[in-house]
Amino acid sequence: MRYIFFLIGILCMSITSCNNPAIPEPMSEQSIEGKIAIAIHGGAGNLKKLNLTEAQEAEYKAVLDSALNAGYAVLKKGGTSIDAVEATIQVMEDSPLFNAGKGAVFNHDGKNEMDAAIMNGADLSCGAVAGVQHVKNPIRAARVVMENSEHILLTAKGAEDFVSQFGVQFVDASYFYTDLRWQQLKEAIAEDSVKLDHDGKKASAQFTIEQLREEKFGTVGCVALDQFGNIAAGTSTGGLTNKRYGRIGDAPLIGAGTYANNNSCAVSCTGRGEDFIRNTIAADIAAQVEYLKIPLDSAVHHSIQEKLKATKGRGGCIAIDRFGHISMSFTTTGMYRGWIDCEGKREVSIY
Ligand code: ASP
């Protein structure tokens, strides 16, 4: 009886999948090949219907739709999941609505410091940049590090100097200025809502409870499955408004905010990075799938709704496996998100 309830629970949690919505049947390589699917997020947070006008909601959904279209078009033409992830994220980075690229938030000093990572589940190759200030599309820079460097994560000037040799587009820091983000910074400073430790005595306890409740995280991410049965993940972010300069979040840390491995799943996270780092959320989900052989939904649910929540972590994630199962979960009231499953069914939603 308990087993039946367990199965029903798992079925209810499933958002979408190719065959059985909950438990991937062991499939031959051949039956995996040919399926394509994609999922995206545009950040989690205290998102309530009350806070967005219909017009604003439509604007967000339009960008999510275009992002999905960009990635799906790559997959449909027979492109790779890593190409789809990059193409999708670039669309969201170019929109001022999301906290990545053009819409990146300001740090305490009024600067934009962006982080991004990309990972290929086929061979575990990955690349990341952190604290870049002049790269138009940080996800491109992450890809360049992945493909041209023997390293995985490059930061700040070192990252910019390196990627400048590979045709990455640079912009003046003023490109990232938006009135909305500047206003948010002024409010955060006025409320002292991110308590920065300027004298270096207290590195922790940076947020008031009120600020955590109100906070919206606008990081963008994508996970995809290509027709070759390979999965990939990418995440790009401006980090947290009013963050201390030099602070690096979870997005560029492989295993924390971003991870992909064909043997388990591809994951992209959003939320207060420190919580994701201390719980190594992306790696935690993948490890459960790989070692416990449990369905993706169960692993995602455990890591987000139990593990992350146990440390009062706020945020969520999207995940995909090579069977095309898509799963997502968040502890906040909403998460901008969308997906196209391997039957071509699509959905974009916020709350
Ligand atoms: N995870 C990001 C960070 O902490 C923020 C976000 O998701 O918006 O840098």
Image (cartoon, rainbow, N blue to C red):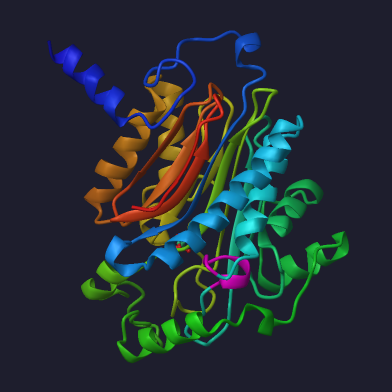
Examine the rendered structure and indicate whether residue 168 appears above or below residue 295: below
Q: Position of residue 342 (x, y in %)?
A: 56, 26
Predominant SS of the magenta segment: loop
Q: Is residue 9 left or right of residue 68?
A: left
Q: Position of residue 223 (x, y in %)?
A: 56, 40
Q: Residue at x 60, y 66 (%)?
A: 95
Q: Residue at x 42, y 29 (%)?
A: 16
Total of numbered circles in the picture? 0
Q: Residue at x 41, y 45 (%)?
A: 281
Q: Position of residue 136 (x, y in %)?
A: 71, 68
Which picture quadrant has residue 174?
bottom right
Q: Nearer the viewer, residue 292 or 60?
A: 60
Q: Nearer the viewer, residue 162 or 267?
A: 267
Q: Is residue 306 left or right of residue 88?
A: left
Examine the rendered structure and indicate whether residue 6 appears above or below residue 216: above
Q: Is residue 325 left or right of residue 214?
A: right
Location of the N terminus (image quadrant): top left
Which picture quadrant has residue 168?
bottom right
Which picture quadrant has residue 130?
bottom right
Q: Residue at x 25, y 50 (%)?
A: 309
Q: Position of residue 90 (x, y in %)?
A: 67, 57
Examine the rendered structure and indicate whether residue 317 appears above or below residue 168: above
Look at the image and give the residue range highlighted in magenta: 97-104
Q: Is residue 173 visible?
A: yes
Is residue 48 found inside the magenta-colored segment of the image? no
Examine the rendered structure and indicate whether residue 131 appears above or below residue 125: below
Q: Nearer the viewer, residue 65 or 203?
A: 65
